[in-house]
Image (tube, rainbow, N blue to C red):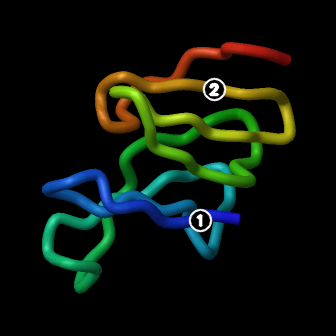
Amino acid sequence: MASMIDIGREWLRISPKDDRKLEFSNNEGRTWMTRTTLNARFEELIEGHGELLAQTDKGLYFSRNDGRTWLLRHR
C-alpha cells in the first residue's frame, strides 16, 4: 500500500494523523502542509499516465492537478 508518492517537485502522502487528508512537502519531507481533504478515507495512492489515483473507502478517485482536486471515477 503506497501512502506516499514522489510526484516530481513534491512528495504527496496520506496524513498519518487523519486519513481523510492528503499532505504535500516541497522540501523532501521536512515539513508537510495539507493539500486537500475528502469526505472519504484515503487507502492508497498511485501515480501513472498523467494522473494520480486514490483508492478510498468510497471508491476510486482521480486527479490531474497534483492532488488539488479529486473526481470520483468508480464507486
Task: Give the residue displayed 71% in from the left and 34% down from the top.
Answer: 39
**Amino acid type shown at disc 2:** Tyr
Q: Which residue is mark 1?
A: 3
Q: Secondary structure at mark 1?
A: loop
Mark 1 neighbour density, 10 Å: few (under 14) some (14–19) many (20 or more): some
Tell whether 25 sits left or right of 64: left
* Residue in the foreground of this view, choosing between 34 and 63: 63
The quadrant in which the C terminus is found is: top right
Q: Position of residue 64 (x, y in %)?
A: 36, 22
The residue labelled by disc 2 is 61
Q: Residue 2 location, x and y as percent?
A: 61, 64
**Residue at (23% x, 85% y) in the render:** 30
Of 66 and 46, the residue lying toward us: 46
Residue at x 36% of width, y 32% of height:
68
Reply above or below: 11 against 60.
below
Give percent across and percent down for residue 17. 63, 73
In the displayed structure, 11 sits above or below 44; it is: below
Q: Give the class, few, some or many, for how many residues have Cα within 10 Å of label 2's Cα (few <14, many ≥20).
A: some
* Mark closer to the chain start, 1 or 2: 1
